[in-house]
Image: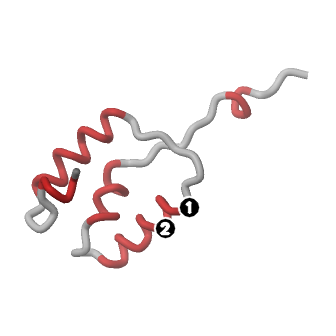
Amino acid sequence: MLPSLLEICCMNAVDTNVLIYVNDSRYPSKQAIAASLVANLTEGVLIWQVACEYLAASRKLEPFGYCKVL
């Protein structure tokens, strides 16, 4: 029997907002939820577009500047 498409072609991707909230202490409840999501992600991928969006968005936040991104 052949495996189903879901068994062989599946991935978890993290959205830009989740990554931003992990590092943004202005919203503690959202930060906690985002941190939990990332911590419980056993396998995942970081899509190039999301990485670029994360860098652009995080540089706009005053307390979360360029040095913390890297």
Image location of residue 61, percent across then percent down: 12, 61
Please name the residue shown 38% across and 48% down the image: 15
Task: Please give the label number shown on residue 62.
Answer: none
At label 2, the amino acid type is Ser
Quick check: marks 1 and 2 in contact, CB under 8 Å?
A: yes
Please name the residue shown 43% across and 48% down the image: 14
The image quarter containing residue 2 is: top right
Image location of residue 41, percent across then percent down: 55, 55
Position of 59 relative to 6 (above/below): below
In this rendering, position of residue 16 left or right of residue 34: left
Image location of residue 54, percent across then percent down: 25, 47
Q: Which residue is mark 2?
A: 36
Q: Residues within 10 Å of mark 1 (few under 14, many from 20)?
A: few
Please, what secondary structure does the residue beneath circle 1 have?
A: loop
At label 1, the amino acid type is Asn
Q: Which residue is mark 1?
A: 40
Quadrant that contains the N terminus? top right
